[in-house]
Image: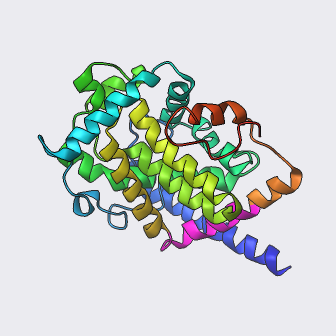
Amino acid sequence: MLRNMRITALRNILIVASCIAITAGCASTSKPALVPDRLPGYLTSVTAPNSEALLTPPPAAGSTALALDHDISRNSLPLRDSPRWALAAMDAELTFPNAAGAFTCALNAPITEQDTPHLYILLRRVLTDTSLATSKAKNKYMRTRPFVENKEGTCSPNDEQFLKKNGSYPSGHSTAGWAWALILTEISPEQADAILARGRAFGQSRVICNAHWQSDVIEGRFMGAATVARLHADPVFRAELDLAGSELAAVRAKGLKPARDCKAEAEALAQYPQQAPWPADK
């Protein structure tokens, strides 16, 4: 009975918070071209981490760090048209429900609007928060993306016109992927290694896709961690996280499995220096 009362209280918090967001925040929420269905986040411009204040400038011309970025970029280009390239293209798509499937193999459970509605909404809202967290540095530095320099194209050609006008540093995808990974490890600690490995691979997909430099990805992970740290101060986020954990437990009790081909995903991840976080025969 106490557990049911607690769940009801959490849901009431979320209902009130959603009403506030709809009346006060939705109208001002930007909707970047890559994510047209974006929801209001949990954070605001005041509470979100400030990437301009937290990050150093991107690698300077002639620096060793910039040379490393270029080396890693060149070494990743041979993966074009491989299974790992195809996975990077899937990771590039941040609209839902596609994005909800990125971690399902690592989690060994589905994430859907029907089976895990609170977790599904949580991931969508955190995506907005990570975008807010990276926007100031992106706008300040407006770093040129690798595909503009090397003329090789990306794994998501339909996005290239938008990406040319969107700063490369830090990587927004990497920020979102790492934030999602950290959050998912909280509700599924038994899969922590697999989830974190997939979060790292999600960021590396941006290098493989020829859309970001390695330093963009590294600093994206830092901003993802900073975003999650701020989110834990928000009671609505914490309430949704608790409900998401209950949903995942229910999904596991039903024996539901990911819709993705986890064997193929593991084999694709094994093409890159980072190994797949789960057995290819799973």
Residue 129 appears anywhere in the view: yes
Asked if residue 238 is positioned above or below residue 64 in the image, the reply reads below
Rendered residue at 57%/47% (across/down):
198
> What kind of secondary structure does the magenta stretch mostly adopt?
helix
Query: Would residue 164 be found to the left or right of residue 206 on screen?
Result: left
The quarter in which the N terminus is drawn is bottom right
**Residue 268 point in image, percent of width and height:** 59, 31
**Residue 192 point in image, percent of width and height:** 63, 59
Q: Quadrant of residue 173?
A: top left
**Residue 227 point in image, percent of width and height:** 42, 62
Asked if residue 232 is positioned above or below residue 80 in the image, the reply reads below
Q: Nearer the viewer, residue 111 or 219?
A: 219
The residue segment tinted magenta is: 232-246
Q: Quadrant of residue 244?
A: bottom right
Rendered residue at 75%/45% (across/down):
114
Q: How many labels were placed on the picture? A: 0
Q: Nearer the viewer, residue 129 or 81?
A: 81
Asked if residue 77 is positioned above or below residue 256 in the image, the reply reads above
Q: Residue furthest left?
A: 62
**Residue 279 falls inside the magenta stretch:** no
